[in-house]
Image (cartoon, coloured by chain):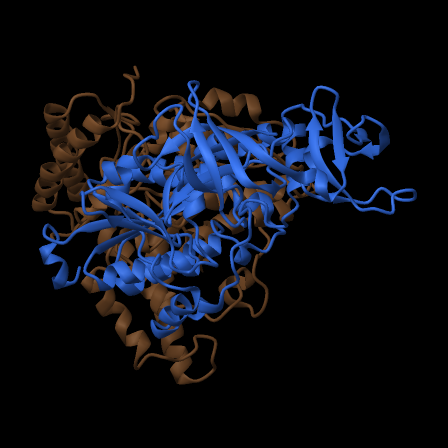
Amino acid sequence: MRKVYLDNNATTPLHPKVLDAMLPYYTELYGNPSSIHNFGREVWGSLVDARESVAKLLGCSPSEIYFTSGGTESDNMAIIGTALANVGRGNHIITSSIEHHAILASCQYLGNNGFEVTYLPVDSYGFVDPDDLKRAIRKGTILVSIMHINNETGVIQDIPGLAAIAKAAGAYFHTDAVQSAGKVGLSVDGLGVDMLSASAHKINGPKGSGLIFIRKGTRVQPRMYGGKHEGAMRAGTENVAGIIGLTKALELSCGMIASELERYRKFSSRFWNALNEIIPNVVLNGPLDEGRLQNTLNITFKGIEGEAIILSLDLAGIAVASGSACTSGSTEPSHVLRAMGVEPWIARGSLRISFGKFTTDEDIDYALEQIPPIVERLRKISPVVSHN
Amino acid sequence: MHSSTQSVEKKKRVLVAMSGGVDSSAAAILLHRSGYEVVGVTMKLWDSSALANADSTKSCCGAESARDAKYVCRKLGAPHYTINYASEFKRDVIDNLVGEYLSGRTPNPCIRCNSYLKWGELVKLADQLDIKFISTGHYARIDRLNDGEYALLKGHDEAKDQSYALWGIQRQLLSRTILPIGTMVKGEIRQLLRDEGFGFSDKPESQEICFVPDNNLPRFIKESAEKSGIAIPEGYIVNRDGTVLGKHRGIPFYTIGQRKWLGIGHTVPLYVKSFHNDRNEVVVSEKDGLLSRTCIVSRLNWLAEKPLQHYEQIFEVKIRYRHLAAPASCELRKDNSMHVAFKEPQRAITPGQSAVFYRAGRVLGGGIIDVAE
């Protein structure tokens, strides 16, 4: 059976060049960067280079980059670390209702521990309305955290606009850029953010490696205590190979953003147009052109109930996702689609297709060949009354 | 994918309901061994996080159980999915259970779960995935008779037989159902899992009601009723003459046949005999008062030819899971209810429980006990 991977927002295969860059750090370059001897110094030097390279790509100073175990840890640091370090300034946090669970669960933790959290709504395309942020922000607001690009729909928020509102009100602004770093051109100053989370494995880097940018002067408490690694912000011997892999992945992906975006645009329009032509009553959850990262298509086939389509595709060798993959293989209606006002039964039947660096035209061909008969079969047997 | 699955089209696929327990794991293994292509599904029937303090290892449907099912499937090279059926389970099983208890009846939720979830939602999923067969880890058998008809039969392990809980499934689904462990006994099942190297072969038996892990069903009923704004009123305990003997905490807290200590003055043990719902009374009697000879069974379902009306036949009738089926003269009435007259009086025939009609080890059909007389 042919296997086609169309779930690149969940994770991506490692780029061979990234693996090559990482391998020496599992073999000859094994020193501890904190050690006083040559073994350590050599590896320490590699970390210095890596940090400089990453800082350059994000447009910040190397001392503002902290390497972590991934997007989730970075998000936890940004939300909980910032809240705890700024209790004197207030107890209010603002986020959106379509964030990744790493943000939402961190905010819930704060909500259970004396902080007040506002979850901003989104419109039917998934956009946060800046006016909602203006209305919600107040004197005691410590932090605003809005994700850059949504993992389920690809919707791109106006981060510069939102960050400016936070700045004017004297609140810190964090963005979860796990789905955008390396996929769209970004700089921390261009975005106007105080903090930014990114991850390696979404851009053909290794799993378990990520970073957080923390603008100089931003008060954040560490979440991990121990040695004075990462400017005493993140204790623990560095995941050297992971950091090297993250750096290489970011370098590679940032070097081809324009051509990749063009490829995704072609895939997306080809896929969407073909589906629309063959299958009636297909709905795109999210905006079609403007405001969507074109590698992500969140689709509902009207009249098909539940997750049967995703399972059928899996049995045909095609990997797509239903909403977020972070609920360990169990299928729940997506909170992102629910926030966009999509009915739960439609949300449960939606599927997310996400293209990646190694997606080919043949992959798209195979998917376009498999999907229509499955949709037709499911529509024939599920006697769902016509929903409008 | 392994190269062996190249012949996917030729291999017969089967959707196996896997709770993560010993029995359904064994079912999946046996099907895999006999050449089926197994697709495992763990049906998440209730939100186990709401029972955070409960020991989730002891029940099916918990997160850990889904993991065990996935683990088995991994060993078989089979796909595994966890699917949330909590809203369907609440609608079709829990709401009915609470309603039945509130009206003084004692339902069997496993039977409804089988009819509505396993031989309902699971079959629907199989249709959607274009899979012909479904399978579960029930101790019962399905045989094809000489005339080509499919029959539901008792499992070979008499002590574990679960055919009683399957009377409510649709007859035409028998031909699509495979019950691989019905010919085995529990010891063989555990041995099979040990042979396959699964550490959980000594997992405890799943308890009676999976979604109430502390087994405190009355509390569950009370809390569910309160959530719907229904209070459970206290009332009087009376004897058969209507004499008040004491107070009760609410009808749902009692089941027929339950022994009831009433303190001083009643040296003879008393048992719950019935309920007067209209007067909110629990009626008690001495042990002999629990015996009755007849009952009316309605909401019938047949897994064999429907009996003729007004024609008495002798069936063996089982009136609860742990009851030894007893011979009774059964007559189908015009209103499609069954009048059952046991040869010997039976103890604690309980409205809400299922009566299942057997002949020579075959389940002919069943229904819900309405009235015992």
The letter of the blue chain is B
A44 or B99, nearer to the observer? B99
**Is A127 left or right of B38, judged from the image as shown?**
right
How far from the left and from the top, in percent, is residue B58? 54, 57
Write the residue at 15% across / 43% down.
A259
- The picture quadrant where one finds residue A20 is bottom left
Task: Name the residue nearer the viewer: B343 or A47.
Answer: B343
Residue A303 visible in the snapshot: yes
Q: Quadrant of the C terminus of chain A?
A: top left
Q: Quadrant of residue A305?
A: top left
Asked whether the viewer can see residue A96, the reply is no
- Quarter holding residue B187: bottom left
Left or right for A106, reference A48 = right
Q: Farthest right residue?
A: B264
Q: Nearer the viewer, residue A155 or B373?
A: B373
Could you say which chain is coloured brown in the image? A
> Is residue A354 found left or right of A170 in the rendered image?
left
Image-based side of A150 in relation to A217, left or right? left
Q: How many marks overall?
A: 0
